[in-house]
Image (cartoon, rainbow, N blue to C red):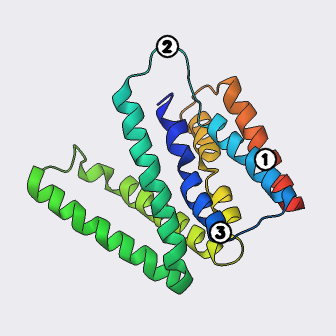
Amino acid sequence: MGVVSPIASLSVLIPLTIAFINGEKPNSTQLIGMSIALTGAVCASGPEIRGGVALKPVLLAVVAAIGFGFAVNFIAKGSTSSAIMTMTTMRFTTFIIAIFLFAKYRTFGGFTKKDLPVLILLGAADFIANLLLGVATTKGLVSLAVVLGSLFPIVTALMAFKLLHERLHKVQYIGIALAIMGVAVISAG
């Protein structure tokens, strides 16, 4: 995950660029805060640049970042009509794709009935997070909403630290501090 996670966290650049192309103009203080917060998000995802990096994981991470970026853009677009229907349609589509995958591979990927509560919680959390992001994009500048919504690596790093007792690297601490600073600067703008 050392180089994959930071690449995937750059997915925000797609909806951010589209928002700017569509004419959004955050003020200079907000732009500075956005830059600081995004740098923090990438650092908090724990990039490891040592050693050689295989090409396939990097390419998959780039494709994932592009997919995530366009998904967030479409969440923002759909939410202008209805955030709840946008999320419901996304989940229905995911369900249909999952049925086709199950029909083709005849497996649940190693999950058992015991895993079901965690999977349901995961699905609910993902639904609610995307719903709130969709609503946020309708309440102000999309560019600010997507930058603030892209700070999830901070929560991931802190949860890994607290729940899984993983050690955070110095760059992750720096990233968390930068993200908090960036949010403060955005708020001041």
Query: What numbered label is drawn on residue 51?
Result: 2
Q: What residue type is labelled 2?
A: Gly
Task: Tell which circle, 3 or 1, labels the residue nearer the N-terminal end.
Answer: 3
Residue 113, horizontal then vertical, whole percent: 25, 53
Image position of 51 with respect to 113: above or below:
above
Q: What element carries label 2?
A: loop
Which of the two residues, 91 or 148, is positioned nearer the viewer here?
Answer: 148
Residue at the limit of the structure toward the top, as seen here: 51
Q: Is mark 3 on a helix, strand or loop?
A: helix
Would you name the residue on which mark 3 appears?
A: 142
Which of the two residues, 52 or 163, is positioned nearer the viewer here?
Answer: 52
Callout 3: 10 Å neighbours few (<14), some, many (20+)? many
Task: Tell which circle, 2 or 1, labels the residue nearer the N-terminal end.
Answer: 2
Q: Which amino acid does label 3 sit on?
A: Val
Camera-side mark, 3 or 1: 3
Residue at the limit of the structure toward the bottom, as seen here: 81
Callout 2: 10 Å neighbours few (<14), some, many (20+)? few
Q: Quadrant of residue 98?
A: bottom left
Residue 2, horizontal then vertical, whole percent: 51, 27
Would you name the residue on which mark 1 appears?
A: 180
Task: Tell which circle, 3 or 2, labels the residue nearer the N-terminal end.
Answer: 2
Q: Distance between the residues labelled 3 and 1?
A: 20 Å
Residue drawn where x is 79% and y is 55% of the image = 31
Tally the numbered discs: 3
Q: Distance between the residues labelled 3 and 2?
A: 38 Å
